[in-house]
Image (cartoon, helix red, strand yellow):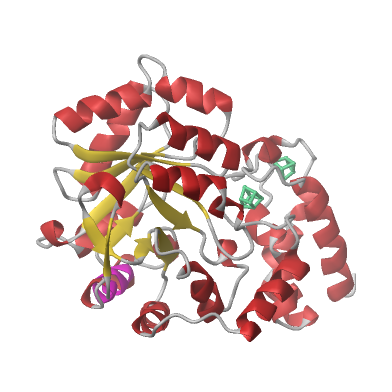
């Protein structure tokens, strides 16, 4: 595994990072095996968040005794200093460490997040103090909003910017990457598989590896998924004309109106299982309608409980018309199960 400099931090990391969301679906024992396998294959950069349930705890357990060999990034969604420091202490405890290499302000998307985070008494002030105390080494930020990500980079307050980047959502490559590069701010690419809708790893990484300044964060939920990506990274990168055609086919099929499975919209006050129900058309494209209907039954049967309160829309970073898409998917589901 080749290594890269993490922007201006002075840290050296593997050229691909381990994204800490998918291990929340795996039990602790197997998560530790996956994490340690990734480490054995040369992955030294691990990104997680306070919000990712037990992901920090699993990373902490996996690397007890090896802390100095890895670079850990985590995040707080809190905007005020007191709550952010509580989350930092929690992260230190869960990760079984006394320092975090990169601590990120999580999902700063709206102006109100920006104002609260940077105001006196806000999270940024707290992180500066934590840095002085040696509890964190560098401060980064994540966003799903392109204008906001550009604005954050231009403040020059952060060492890294984390933003979705893949061959379907490639808008960041213009202004965001250019501004970050000018300032030697590292770009961490979240969602290399567009939240699971890209199921062709070879093409996904053929695209991403064209951008040597970008560090993709790939989520792994099995040893096989680690090995698949590692084997791609062992080869020189080439983007063939067939790869370009495949990328175009995905773009044409998905458009912009698709769920990235980030789960920010949940929970629904009426118990609708939003994320799996939003993904119904993707299931259908990968299996027969009858199998998809059976597979997604529990999620789809929760859709009629939707009262269209729109609470979820305000939490979706992509502003998807969730109740409308759920309804469309439910109509399709009904035809598949003969209702
Ligand atoms: S709009 Fe529907 S799915 Fe969204 S939070 Fe309200 S009830 Fe739940
Ligand atoms: S609907 Fe929006 S917030 Fe919910 S999982 Fe999909 S992309 Fe994320």
In-image side of 126 versus 272 (left or right): left
Q: Quadrant of residue 33?
A: bottom left
Looking at the image, residue 101 lies above or below residue 315: below
What percent of the width, then of the height, locates residue 97?
15, 48
- For the record, the magenta segment spans 31-38
Q: Quadrant of residue 331?
A: bottom right
Residue 251 visible at all: yes
**Residue 136 sits inside the magenta stretch:** no
Residue at 24% over, 46% down: 9
The dominant secondary structure in magenta is helix
**Residue 33 sits inside the magenta stretch:** yes
Residue at 49% over, 21% down: 115
Q: Quadrant of residue 103?
A: top left
Residue 161 visible at all: no
Where, quadrant-wise, is the N terminus in this rendering?
bottom left
Where, quadrant-wise, is the C terminus in this rendering?
bottom right
Residue at 61% over, 43% down: 317
Q: Residue furthest top?
A: 120
In-image side of 37 versus 147 (left or right): left
Looking at the image, residue 34 lies above or below residue 190: below
What percent of the width, then of the height, locates residue 272?
69, 50
In-image side of 335 versus 165 (left or right): right
Looking at the image, residue 153 lies above or below residue 213: above
Q: Quick one: 75 or 289, which is closer to the camera? A: 75
């Amino acid at each position: 595994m080749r290594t890269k400099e993490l922007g201006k931090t002075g840290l050296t990391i593997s050229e691909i990072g381990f994204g800490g969301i998918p291990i929340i679906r795996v039990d602790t024992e197997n998560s530790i095996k996956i994490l340690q396998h990734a480490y054995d294959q040369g992955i030294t950069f691990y990104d997680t968040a306070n919000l990712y349930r037990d992901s920090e705890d699993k990373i902490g357990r996996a690397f007890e005794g090896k802390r100095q060999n890895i670079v850990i990034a985590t995040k707080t969604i809190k905007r005020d200093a007191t709550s952010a420091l509580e989350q930092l202490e929690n992260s230190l405890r869960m990760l079984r460490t006394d320092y975090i290499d990169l601590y990120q302000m999580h999902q700063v998307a709206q102006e109100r997040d920006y104002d609260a985070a940077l105001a006196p008494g806000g999270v940024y002030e707290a992180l500066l103090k934590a840095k002085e105390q040696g509890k964190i080494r560098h401060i980064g930020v994540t966003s799903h909003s392109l204008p906001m990500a550009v604005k954050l980079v231009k403040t020059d307050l952060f060492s890294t910017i984390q933003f979705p980047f893949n061959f379907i959502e490639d808008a960041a490559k213009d202004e965001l990457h250019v501004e970050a590069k000018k300032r030697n701010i590292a770009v961490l690419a979240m969602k290399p598989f567009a939240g699971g809708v890209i199921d062709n790893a070879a093409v996904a990484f053929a695209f991403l590896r064209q951008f040597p300044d970008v560090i993709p964060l790939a989520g792994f939920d099995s040893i096989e998924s680690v090995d698949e990506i590692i084997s791609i990274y062992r080869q020189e990168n080439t983007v063939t004309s067939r790869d370009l055609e495949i990328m175009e086919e995905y773009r044409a099929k998905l458009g912009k109106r698709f769920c990235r499975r980030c789960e920010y919209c949940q929970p629904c006050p009426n118990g609708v299982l939003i994320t799996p129900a939003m993904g119904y058309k993707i299931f259908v494209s990968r299996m027969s309608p009858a199998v998809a209907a059976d597979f997604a039954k529990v999620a789809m049967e929760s859709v009629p409980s939707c009262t269209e309160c729109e609470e979820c829309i305000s939490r979706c970073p992509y502003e998807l018309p969730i109740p409308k898409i759920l309804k469309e998917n439910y109509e399709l589901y009904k035809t598949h199960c003969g209702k």
